[in-house]
């Protein structure tokens, strides 16, 4: 595995496809401000993530993972105008053969655009079966040593979320959208989310609710004690740019202006 990974990262062969990033805001409603943006892989003409990921295979997985990080940081560096905005990047744990070595290109890109390590958050998804949980733990340990944040995405939708939390604790948990869809009218979902919030608080983990689409969902999740949100209610992802963020009146303001492009 490590030999393939090393060759995959260093190979001079370019990826057989091109891609860019779209950015979707993460909003802190307790402060009515942008907490950060998630970088979402897209085709150059706006094709969805599935179109891009469908071209990733064992031969180019390592190079693609590296290229995604660098592309996201370089684009964000041209868009962000302050050093408080965070950038969240998805990564493939199974495409990281050695955490300290595989992060070098990311660190170089961050230095080039002037990003502090604390501005970067790396998300791994519960939907990706973990081939080696101990390996994921080593990645999280190294990333924390470097000053990055880590997040477990799609919590509640994948293979073994509670077992993963028992093994290691990321800085954030992103609640899967299917868990929160219709939560305003679902006592069962409300109880489950309240339990996750309580558990996360005891573990020192921040909850982020993703895929929020209605004010009713927002109000129910706020009542559960959640303050970080992401979803179409606030903004759709914008291709290679930052969208304007709309906040419903329940948040106490009308709009939050996205950072202006430099």
Image (cartoon, grey):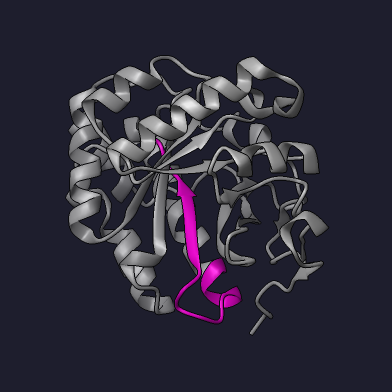
Residue 156 percent location from the top left of the image: 50, 22
80 drawn magenta = yes
Q: How many marks?
A: 0
Q: Quadrant of the C terminus?
A: bottom right
Residue 220 percent location from the top left of the image: 68, 36
113 drawn magenta = no
User: In this rendering, does residue 3 appear at all?
Assistant: no
Which residue does the image show at 60% across and 74% down from the upper left? 79
In the figure, 48 relative to 28: above or below? above
Relative to 66, is 68 on the left or the right?
Answer: right
Residue 149 percent location from the top left of the image: 34, 53
Which residue does the image show at 63% across and 38% down from the upper left? 221
In the figure, 53 relative to 208: above or below? above
Q: Looking at this view, is 262 or 217 the one in front? A: 217
Which residue does the image show at 62% across and 44% down from the upper left? 222
Q: Looking at this view, is 188 or 55 the one in front? A: 188
Residue 148 percent location from the top left of the image: 31, 57
Q: Looking at this view, is 163 or 140 the one in front? A: 163
Q: Quadrant of residue 226?
A: top right
Q: Quadrant of residue 164?
A: top left
Q: Quadrant of the N terminus?
A: top left
Relative to 10, is 172 on the left or the right?
Answer: right
Which residue does the image show at 25% across and 32% down from the upper left? 136
Magenta residue span: 75-92
User: In this rendering, does residue 169 appear at all?
Assistant: yes
Q: Looking at this view, is 122 or 164 the one in front? A: 164
In the figure, 226 relative to 130: above or below? below
């Amino acid at each position: 595995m490590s030999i393939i990974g090393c060759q995959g990262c260093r190979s001079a062969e370019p990826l057989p496809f091109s891609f860019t990033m779209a950015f979707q805001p993460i909003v802190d409603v307790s402060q009515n401000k942008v907490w950060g943006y998630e970088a979402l892989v897209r085709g150059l003409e706006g094709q969805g993530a599935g179109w891009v990921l469908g071209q990733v295979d064992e031969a180019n997985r390592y190079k693609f993972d590296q290229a995604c990080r660098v592309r996201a940081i370089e684009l964000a560096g041209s868009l962000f105008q302050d050093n408080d905005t965070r950038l969240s990047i998805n990564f493939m744990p199974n495409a990281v053969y050695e955490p300290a070595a595989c992060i070098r290109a990311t660190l170089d890109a961050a230095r080039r655009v002037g990003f502090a390590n604390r501005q970067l958050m790396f998300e791994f998804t519960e939907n990706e079966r973990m081939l080696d949980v101990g390996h994921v733990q080593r990645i999280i340990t190294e990333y924390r040593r470097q000053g990055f944040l880590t997040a477990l995405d799609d919590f509640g939708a994948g293979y073994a979320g509670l077992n993963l939390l028992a093994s290691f604790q990321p800085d954030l948990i992103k609640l899967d959208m299917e868990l929160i869809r219709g939560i305003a009218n679902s006592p069962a979902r409300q109880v489950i989310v309240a339990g996750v919030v309580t558990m996360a608080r005891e573990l020192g983990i921040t909850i982020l609710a993703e895929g929020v689409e209605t004010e009713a969902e927002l109000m129910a999740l706020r009542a559960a004690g959640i303050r970080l949100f992401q979803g179409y209610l606030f903004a759709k992802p914008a291709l290679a740019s930052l969208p304007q963020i709309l906040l419903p009146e329940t948040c106490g303001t009308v709009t939050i202006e996205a950072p202006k492009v430099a």
